[in-house]
Amino acid sequence: MKKINPAIYVAVTLGVIGVCMQPSLASTFSEWKPNLSEKILLLPPQHLEQAIDNDFSKSLLAQDLSDIDLQLGNQVSHIQSLQDAETQYSGEENIEIRHQILEGKKSYVELMGTQLDLKRERLTTKLNYLKRLMNKAKRKGARLEETSELRALQENATQRANAAENTLRDDLFETSLGEESKFSQHYTKNKQAIAQLRSLIENHPMNSQLTSAGADSTVGHLNNLILSAEAELAVIDMESEILGYMARLLALDAMALAEDVAIESYGGDGLPEPINFTEPAEGLQLFLN
Amino acid sequence: MKQKLFFILTATMFLSGQAVQAGSLENLERERALTVMEMIDGELTAEDRWEKQAAAKRRLADLERIVLNDKKLQGKASQLVQRSFQSFELTFLAHASAEKQRSMQSHWMSEVGLSTDELMSTRVSR
Protein backbone atom coordinates (compact mmCIF):
# COMPACT_ATOMS: atom_id res chain seq x y z
CA MET A 1 0.00 0.00 0.00
CA LYS A 2 1.32 3.35 -1.07
CA LYS A 3 2.19 5.58 1.89
CA ILE A 4 0.68 9.04 1.92
CA ASN A 5 3.25 11.73 2.48
CA PRO A 6 2.19 13.31 5.78
CA ALA A 7 4.05 16.52 4.94
CA ILE A 8 1.66 17.20 2.09
CA TYR A 9 -1.38 16.69 4.32
CA VAL A 10 0.06 18.83 7.05
CA ALA A 11 0.69 21.58 4.48
CA VAL A 12 -2.86 21.23 3.11
CA THR A 13 -4.32 21.26 6.62
CA LEU A 14 -2.36 24.35 7.55
CA GLY A 15 -3.55 25.96 4.33
CA VAL A 16 -7.19 25.17 5.11
CA ILE A 17 -6.83 26.48 8.65
CA GLY A 18 -5.11 29.62 7.40
CA VAL A 19 -7.88 30.31 4.89
CA CYS A 20 -10.57 29.64 7.46
CA MET A 21 -9.09 32.06 9.94
CA GLN A 22 -9.24 34.89 7.39
CA PRO A 23 -12.51 36.81 7.41
CA SER A 24 -12.71 36.85 3.64
CA LEU A 25 -10.53 36.83 0.60
CA ALA A 26 -12.81 39.10 -1.35
CA SER A 27 -11.12 42.43 -1.48
CA THR A 28 -11.21 43.45 -5.13
CA PHE A 29 -14.88 44.09 -5.90
CA SER A 30 -16.59 45.47 -8.86
CA GLU A 31 -18.54 48.50 -7.74
CA TRP A 32 -22.07 49.82 -8.08
CA LYS A 33 -22.34 53.56 -8.52
CA PRO A 34 -26.02 54.49 -8.71
CA ASN A 35 -26.53 56.37 -11.94
CA LEU A 36 -29.95 57.90 -11.39
CA SER A 37 -30.99 61.52 -11.79
CA GLU A 38 -32.62 63.60 -9.06
CA LYS A 39 -35.88 63.20 -10.96
CA ILE A 40 -36.22 59.80 -9.33
CA LEU A 41 -37.85 61.74 -6.46
CA LEU A 42 -40.71 62.65 -8.78
CA LEU A 43 -41.62 58.98 -9.13
CA PRO A 44 -44.41 57.55 -7.00
CA PRO A 45 -42.90 56.02 -3.81
CA GLN A 46 -43.72 52.43 -4.79
CA HIS A 47 -41.65 52.81 -7.98
CA LEU A 48 -38.66 54.37 -6.24
CA GLU A 49 -37.18 51.11 -4.99
CA GLN A 50 -37.91 49.44 -8.31
CA ALA A 51 -35.88 52.12 -10.11
CA ILE A 52 -32.95 51.69 -7.68
CA ASP A 53 -33.03 47.89 -8.07
CA ASN A 54 -33.14 48.23 -11.86
CA ASP A 55 -30.07 50.44 -11.75
CA PHE A 56 -28.29 47.91 -9.52
CA SER A 57 -29.13 45.01 -11.84
CA LYS A 58 -27.18 46.76 -14.63
CA SER A 59 -24.02 47.06 -12.50
CA LEU A 60 -20.93 44.84 -12.47
CA LEU A 61 -21.57 44.14 -8.80
CA ALA A 62 -24.90 42.49 -9.67
CA GLN A 63 -23.17 40.39 -12.31
CA ASP A 64 -20.54 39.25 -9.81
CA LEU A 65 -23.23 38.39 -7.27
CA SER A 66 -25.13 36.22 -9.72
CA ASP A 67 -21.86 34.51 -10.81
CA ILE A 68 -21.11 33.69 -7.18
CA ASP A 69 -24.63 32.36 -6.65
CA LEU A 70 -24.06 29.98 -9.54
CA GLN A 71 -20.66 28.88 -8.23
CA LEU A 72 -22.09 28.33 -4.75
CA GLY A 73 -24.82 26.09 -6.15
CA ASN A 74 -22.24 24.00 -8.02
CA GLN A 75 -20.01 23.81 -4.95
CA VAL A 76 -22.85 22.60 -2.72
CA SER A 77 -23.84 19.82 -5.14
CA HIS A 78 -20.16 18.81 -5.46
CA ILE A 79 -19.77 18.54 -1.66
CA GLN A 80 -23.04 16.61 -1.35
CA SER A 81 -21.98 14.05 -3.96
CA LEU A 82 -18.62 13.60 -2.17
CA GLN A 83 -20.35 13.17 1.19
CA ASP A 84 -22.59 10.50 -0.34
CA ALA A 85 -19.55 8.64 -1.65
CA GLU A 86 -17.54 8.93 1.57
CA THR A 87 -19.15 5.91 3.28
CA GLN A 88 -18.51 3.65 0.29
CA TYR A 89 -14.72 3.82 0.64
CA SER A 90 -12.24 3.04 3.39
CA GLY A 91 -8.58 3.53 4.12
CA GLU A 92 -6.56 5.71 1.80
CA GLU A 93 -9.49 6.35 -0.59
CA ASN A 94 -11.66 7.46 2.32
CA ILE A 95 -8.97 9.88 3.44
CA GLU A 96 -8.69 11.20 -0.11
CA ILE A 97 -12.47 11.81 -0.24
CA ARG A 98 -12.42 13.46 3.17
CA HIS A 99 -9.61 15.67 1.92
CA GLN A 100 -11.66 16.62 -1.16
CA ILE A 101 -14.69 17.38 1.03
CA LEU A 102 -12.53 19.68 3.13
CA GLU A 103 -11.23 21.39 -0.01
CA GLY A 104 -14.84 21.77 -1.23
CA LYS A 105 -15.94 23.20 2.10
CA LYS A 106 -12.99 25.58 2.06
CA SER A 107 -14.04 26.86 -1.38
CA TYR A 108 -17.64 27.12 -0.16
CA VAL A 109 -16.62 29.21 2.85
CA GLU A 110 -14.49 31.45 0.63
CA LEU A 111 -17.30 31.92 -1.88
CA MET A 112 -19.83 32.53 0.85
CA GLY A 113 -17.52 35.14 2.41
CA THR A 114 -17.16 36.87 -0.95
CA GLN A 115 -20.90 36.77 -1.47
CA LEU A 116 -21.54 38.33 1.94
CA ASP A 117 -19.01 41.07 1.20
CA LEU A 118 -20.69 41.80 -2.13
CA LYS A 119 -24.10 41.89 -0.47
CA ARG A 120 -22.73 44.23 2.19
CA GLU A 121 -21.27 46.44 -0.53
CA ARG A 122 -24.64 46.57 -2.32
CA LEU A 123 -26.54 47.41 0.85
CA THR A 124 -24.04 50.03 2.00
CA THR A 125 -24.16 51.75 -1.40
CA LYS A 126 -27.96 51.57 -1.42
CA LEU A 127 -28.13 52.95 2.11
CA ASN A 128 -25.81 55.87 1.31
CA TYR A 129 -27.79 56.61 -1.84
CA LEU A 130 -31.10 56.51 0.03
CA LYS A 131 -29.70 58.87 2.67
CA ARG A 132 -28.60 61.28 -0.08
CA LEU A 133 -32.08 61.09 -1.62
CA MET A 134 -33.63 61.69 1.79
CA ASN A 135 -31.59 64.90 2.24
CA LYS A 136 -32.64 66.07 -1.21
CA ALA A 137 -36.30 65.26 -0.54
CA LYS A 138 -36.16 67.18 2.75
CA ARG A 139 -34.56 70.20 1.05
CA LYS A 140 -37.17 70.04 -1.72
CA GLY A 141 -39.95 69.88 0.86
CA ALA A 142 -38.58 72.96 2.62
CA ARG A 143 -38.32 74.81 -0.71
CA LEU A 144 -41.89 73.87 -1.66
CA GLU A 145 -43.12 75.19 1.67
CA GLU A 146 -41.32 78.49 1.06
CA THR A 147 -42.88 78.96 -2.39
CA SER A 148 -46.32 77.55 -1.66
CA GLU A 149 -47.86 81.03 -1.29
CA LEU A 150 -46.45 82.12 -4.63
CA ARG A 151 -47.65 78.93 -6.29
CA ALA A 152 -51.15 79.57 -5.00
CA LEU A 153 -51.01 83.11 -6.42
CA GLN A 154 -49.83 81.81 -9.78
CA GLU A 155 -52.52 79.17 -9.88
CA ASN A 156 -55.17 81.74 -9.02
CA ALA A 157 -53.90 84.09 -11.76
CA THR A 158 -54.00 81.29 -14.32
CA GLN A 159 -57.54 80.33 -13.35
CA ARG A 160 -58.76 83.93 -13.57
CA ALA A 161 -57.02 84.46 -16.91
CA ASN A 162 -58.50 81.24 -18.31
CA ALA A 163 -61.97 82.29 -17.19
CA ALA A 164 -61.57 85.67 -18.90
CA GLU A 165 -60.03 84.20 -22.06
CA ASN A 166 -63.25 84.00 -24.09
CA THR A 167 -64.27 87.57 -23.23
CA LEU A 168 -60.80 88.76 -24.14
CA ARG A 169 -60.89 86.97 -27.47
CA ASP A 170 -64.25 88.56 -28.27
CA ASP A 171 -62.89 92.01 -27.31
CA LEU A 172 -59.85 91.53 -29.50
CA PHE A 173 -62.03 90.36 -32.37
CA GLU A 174 -64.29 93.43 -32.06
CA THR A 175 -61.39 95.87 -31.99
CA SER A 176 -59.44 93.93 -34.61
CA LEU A 177 -57.13 96.05 -36.70
CA GLY A 178 -55.57 93.20 -38.55
CA GLU A 179 -55.22 89.45 -38.39
CA GLU A 180 -54.89 87.51 -35.18
CA SER A 181 -51.23 87.24 -34.12
CA LYS A 182 -49.33 84.06 -34.97
CA PHE A 183 -48.74 83.36 -31.28
CA SER A 184 -52.42 83.76 -30.52
CA GLN A 185 -53.38 81.22 -33.21
CA HIS A 186 -50.87 78.67 -31.94
CA TYR A 187 -51.78 79.41 -28.34
CA THR A 188 -55.46 78.60 -28.86
CA LYS A 189 -54.68 75.40 -30.76
CA ASN A 190 -52.09 74.21 -28.23
CA LYS A 191 -54.25 75.13 -25.25
CA GLN A 192 -57.08 72.96 -26.61
CA ALA A 193 -54.67 70.06 -27.23
CA ILE A 194 -53.28 70.37 -23.69
CA ALA A 195 -56.79 70.43 -22.20
CA GLN A 196 -57.75 67.27 -24.13
CA LEU A 197 -54.59 65.44 -23.10
CA ARG A 198 -55.02 66.48 -19.45
CA SER A 199 -58.55 65.16 -19.34
CA LEU A 200 -57.37 61.88 -20.90
CA ILE A 201 -54.61 61.61 -18.27
CA GLU A 202 -57.03 62.34 -15.43
CA ASN A 203 -59.42 59.65 -16.62
CA HIS A 204 -56.74 57.05 -17.30
CA PRO A 205 -57.17 53.98 -15.03
CA MET A 206 -53.43 53.85 -14.26
CA ASN A 207 -53.37 57.50 -13.22
CA SER A 208 -54.65 56.84 -9.69
CA GLN A 209 -51.82 54.35 -9.12
CA LEU A 210 -49.09 56.51 -10.61
CA THR A 211 -49.91 59.91 -9.17
CA SER A 212 -46.73 61.44 -7.80
CA ALA A 213 -46.75 61.74 -4.06
CA GLY A 214 -45.90 64.88 -2.14
CA ALA A 215 -42.53 65.50 -0.53
CA ASP A 216 -43.81 64.27 2.85
CA SER A 217 -44.84 60.82 1.64
CA THR A 218 -41.58 60.50 -0.33
CA VAL A 219 -39.61 61.22 2.84
CA GLY A 220 -41.70 58.65 4.73
CA HIS A 221 -41.17 56.01 2.06
CA LEU A 222 -37.43 56.74 1.88
CA ASN A 223 -37.29 56.36 5.65
CA ASN A 224 -38.89 52.90 5.36
CA LEU A 225 -36.40 51.91 2.66
CA ILE A 226 -33.49 53.07 4.82
CA LEU A 227 -34.78 51.04 7.78
CA SER A 228 -35.20 48.00 5.56
CA ALA A 229 -31.63 48.34 4.18
CA GLU A 230 -30.25 48.66 7.72
CA ALA A 231 -32.16 45.53 8.78
CA GLU A 232 -30.71 43.63 5.82
CA LEU A 233 -27.21 44.77 6.85
CA ALA A 234 -27.84 43.42 10.34
CA VAL A 235 -28.83 40.07 8.80
CA ILE A 236 -25.57 40.07 6.80
CA ASP A 237 -23.62 40.58 10.05
CA MET A 238 -25.37 37.57 11.57
CA GLU A 239 -24.65 35.52 8.46
CA SER A 240 -20.97 36.47 8.77
CA GLU A 241 -21.00 35.12 12.31
CA ILE A 242 -22.49 31.83 11.07
CA LEU A 243 -19.78 31.66 8.43
CA GLY A 244 -17.15 32.23 11.13
CA TYR A 245 -18.44 29.17 13.03
CA MET A 246 -18.43 27.15 9.81
CA ALA A 247 -14.81 28.11 9.21
CA ARG A 248 -13.85 27.12 12.77
CA LEU A 249 -15.56 23.74 12.37
CA LEU A 250 -13.74 23.26 9.07
CA ALA A 251 -10.41 23.99 10.75
CA LEU A 252 -11.15 21.37 13.42
CA ASP A 253 -12.11 18.85 10.71
CA ALA A 254 -8.84 19.58 8.92
CA MET A 255 -6.88 19.01 12.13
CA ALA A 256 -8.69 15.69 12.69
CA LEU A 257 -7.90 14.65 9.12
CA ALA A 258 -4.22 15.50 9.58
CA GLU A 259 -4.14 13.32 12.69
CA ASP A 260 -5.87 10.41 10.89
CA VAL A 261 -3.39 10.70 8.01
CA ALA A 262 -0.50 10.52 10.44
CA ILE A 263 -1.93 7.42 12.12
CA GLU A 264 -2.58 5.76 8.72
CA SER A 265 0.97 6.52 7.53
CA TYR A 266 2.68 4.91 10.50
CA GLY A 267 0.62 1.72 10.55
CA GLY A 268 -1.90 2.87 13.07
CA ASP A 269 0.69 3.82 15.70
CA GLY A 270 0.76 7.47 15.00
CA LEU A 271 3.90 9.57 14.67
CA PRO A 272 7.10 8.03 16.22
CA GLU A 273 8.47 9.75 19.29
CA PRO A 274 11.23 12.15 18.25
CA ILE A 275 14.74 11.04 19.40
CA ASN A 276 16.57 13.55 21.51
CA PHE A 277 20.22 13.62 20.44
CA THR A 278 21.24 16.19 23.00
CA GLU A 279 22.01 13.43 25.51
CA PRO A 280 25.13 11.26 24.87
CA ALA A 281 23.30 8.00 25.64
CA GLU A 282 20.86 8.60 22.75
CA GLY A 283 23.74 8.71 20.23
CA LEU A 284 25.31 5.55 21.49
CA GLN A 285 24.04 3.45 18.55
CA LEU A 286 26.17 5.54 16.15
CA PHE A 287 29.31 4.32 17.91
CA LEU A 288 28.26 0.69 18.31
CA ASN A 289 27.99 0.08 14.50
CA MET B 1 -1.52 103.96 -23.18
CA LYS B 2 -2.13 101.97 -26.36
CA GLN B 3 -2.22 98.76 -24.36
CA LYS B 4 -4.83 100.20 -22.02
CA LEU B 5 -6.99 101.29 -24.93
CA PHE B 6 -6.70 97.85 -26.53
CA PHE B 7 -7.72 96.18 -23.27
CA ILE B 8 -10.77 98.45 -22.85
CA LEU B 9 -11.85 97.84 -26.45
CA THR B 10 -11.46 94.06 -26.09
CA ALA B 11 -13.46 94.03 -22.84
CA THR B 12 -16.20 96.16 -24.41
CA MET B 13 -16.42 93.87 -27.43
CA PHE B 14 -16.56 90.80 -25.21
CA LEU B 15 -19.30 92.21 -22.99
CA SER B 16 -21.41 93.55 -25.84
CA GLY B 17 -21.14 90.20 -27.62
CA GLN B 18 -23.01 88.46 -24.83
CA ALA B 19 -26.73 88.34 -25.53
CA VAL B 20 -28.90 89.83 -22.83
CA GLN B 21 -32.15 87.89 -22.72
CA ALA B 22 -35.04 89.42 -20.83
CA GLY B 23 -37.53 87.17 -19.11
CA SER B 24 -41.17 86.95 -20.08
CA LEU B 25 -42.21 89.01 -17.08
CA GLU B 26 -39.72 91.79 -17.89
CA ASN B 27 -41.07 91.93 -21.46
CA LEU B 28 -44.62 92.23 -20.15
CA GLU B 29 -43.59 94.98 -17.73
CA ARG B 30 -41.96 96.95 -20.56
CA GLU B 31 -45.02 96.66 -22.80
CA ARG B 32 -47.31 97.57 -19.93
CA ALA B 33 -45.28 100.71 -19.17
CA LEU B 34 -45.52 101.79 -22.82
CA THR B 35 -49.28 101.15 -22.80
CA VAL B 36 -49.78 103.24 -19.66
CA MET B 37 -47.70 106.03 -21.16
CA GLU B 38 -50.00 106.01 -24.19
CA MET B 39 -53.06 106.04 -21.92
CA ILE B 40 -51.98 109.26 -20.24
CA ASP B 41 -50.35 110.94 -23.22
CA GLY B 42 -52.17 114.28 -23.54
CA GLU B 43 -50.89 114.94 -27.05
CA LEU B 44 -52.73 111.98 -28.60
CA THR B 45 -56.11 112.44 -30.25
CA ALA B 46 -58.94 110.20 -29.10
CA GLU B 47 -58.83 108.27 -32.36
CA ASP B 48 -55.06 107.73 -32.21
CA ARG B 49 -55.32 106.64 -28.62
CA TRP B 50 -58.06 104.13 -29.42
CA GLU B 51 -55.99 102.63 -32.23
CA LYS B 52 -52.85 102.46 -30.16
CA GLN B 53 -54.69 100.92 -27.22
CA ALA B 54 -56.28 98.27 -29.43
CA ALA B 55 -52.86 97.28 -30.78
CA ALA B 56 -51.39 97.37 -27.27
CA LYS B 57 -54.17 95.16 -25.93
CA ARG B 58 -53.38 92.52 -28.53
CA ARG B 59 -49.67 92.60 -27.67
CA LEU B 60 -50.37 92.60 -23.93
CA ALA B 61 -52.77 89.65 -24.24
CA ASP B 62 -50.05 87.59 -25.94
CA LEU B 63 -47.39 88.61 -23.43
CA GLU B 64 -49.70 87.84 -20.50
CA ARG B 65 -50.40 84.38 -21.89
CA ILE B 66 -46.67 83.82 -22.24
CA VAL B 67 -46.10 84.84 -18.60
CA LEU B 68 -48.94 82.65 -17.31
CA ASN B 69 -47.53 79.63 -19.14
CA ASP B 70 -43.87 80.32 -18.32
CA LYS B 71 -42.66 77.27 -16.37
CA LYS B 72 -39.50 79.12 -15.34
CA LEU B 73 -41.58 81.47 -13.21
CA GLN B 74 -43.35 78.71 -11.30
CA GLY B 75 -42.12 78.73 -7.75
CA LYS B 76 -39.52 81.42 -8.53
CA ALA B 77 -39.50 83.37 -5.30
CA SER B 78 -38.06 86.66 -6.58
CA GLN B 79 -39.48 89.98 -5.46
CA LEU B 80 -40.56 90.91 -8.99
CA VAL B 81 -42.45 87.65 -9.58
CA GLN B 82 -44.07 87.81 -6.15
CA ARG B 83 -45.31 91.37 -6.55
CA SER B 84 -46.47 90.83 -10.13
CA PHE B 85 -48.68 87.88 -9.22
CA GLN B 86 -49.94 89.58 -6.06
CA SER B 87 -51.44 92.39 -8.14
CA PHE B 88 -53.21 90.50 -10.90
CA GLU B 89 -55.37 93.54 -11.74
CA LEU B 90 -52.41 95.72 -12.69
CA THR B 91 -50.00 93.12 -14.05
CA PHE B 92 -52.39 91.31 -16.38
CA LEU B 93 -54.17 94.39 -17.71
CA ALA B 94 -55.68 92.77 -20.81
CA HIS B 95 -57.10 89.75 -18.99
CA ALA B 96 -58.20 91.65 -15.87
CA SER B 97 -60.01 94.31 -17.94
CA ALA B 98 -61.76 91.57 -19.94
CA GLU B 99 -62.73 89.89 -16.66
CA LYS B 100 -64.28 93.15 -15.40
CA GLN B 101 -65.75 93.83 -18.86
CA ARG B 102 -64.24 97.29 -19.01
CA SER B 103 -61.86 99.00 -21.36
CA MET B 104 -58.21 98.61 -20.47
CA GLN B 105 -57.85 102.33 -19.86
CA SER B 106 -60.79 102.67 -17.47
CA HIS B 107 -59.74 99.49 -15.70
CA TRP B 108 -56.22 100.81 -15.10
CA MET B 109 -57.47 104.21 -13.98
CA SER B 110 -59.93 102.71 -11.53
CA GLU B 111 -57.23 100.42 -10.11
CA VAL B 112 -54.80 103.28 -9.48
CA GLY B 113 -57.57 105.43 -7.97
CA LEU B 114 -58.35 107.73 -10.88
CA SER B 115 -62.08 107.03 -11.17
CA THR B 116 -64.56 109.90 -11.68
CA ASP B 117 -65.98 109.50 -8.17
CA GLU B 118 -62.57 109.55 -6.59
CA LEU B 119 -61.46 112.56 -8.64
CA MET B 120 -64.67 114.39 -7.74
CA SER B 121 -64.17 113.72 -4.06
CA THR B 122 -60.70 115.29 -4.01
CA ARG B 123 -60.26 118.83 -2.81
CA VAL B 124 -57.76 121.46 -3.74
CA SER B 125 -55.32 122.25 -1.00
CA ARG B 126 -51.98 123.94 -0.62
Image (spheres, grey):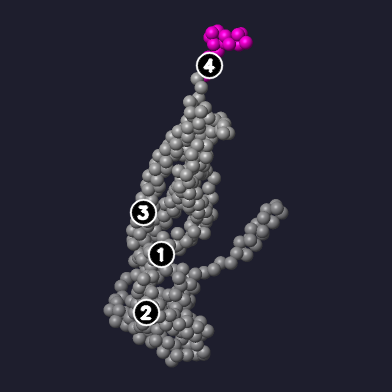
Q: Which sits in the foreground, B23 or A50?
A: A50
Q: Which sits in the foreground, B31 or A96?
A: A96
Which residue is painted at 51% across and 90% down in the image? Answer: A178
Q: For the residues carrying marks 1 and 4, which lies nearer the camera in this image?
A: 4
Q: Which residue position holds label 2? A: A203
Quadrant in the rendering for residue A209: bottom left
**Relative to residue A281, is residue A4 depicted above or below?**
below
Label 1's element? Answer: helix
3D distance between C-alphas at marks 4 and 2: 96 Å
Mark seen at residue A228: 3
On the image, the x and y values in percent for residue A98 come to 49, 40
Q: Which residue position holds label 4? A: A275
**Amino acid type of disc 1?**
His
* Disc with the residue nearer the chain's start (1 vs 4): 1
Q: Which sits in the foreground, A187 or B104?
A: A187
Magenta span: A274-289
Q: Which residue position holds label 1? A: A47
**Relative to residue A261, is residue B19 depicted above or below?**
below
* Disc with the residue nearer the chain's start (1 vs 3): 1
Which residue is painted at 37% across and 83% down in the image? Answer: A164
**Amino acid type of disc 4?**
Ile
On the image, the x and y values in percent for residue A198 come to 41, 78
Which residue is painted at 52% across and 55% down in the image? Answer: A63
Q: Chain of mark 2?
A: A
Quadrant in the rendering for residue B53: bottom left
Label 4's element? Answer: loop
* Disc with the residue nearer the chain's start (2 vs 1): 1
Is there CB contact under 8 Å for labels 2 and 1?
no
Q: Chain of mark 4?
A: A
In the rendered view, does A262 fall on the left or right side of A205?
right
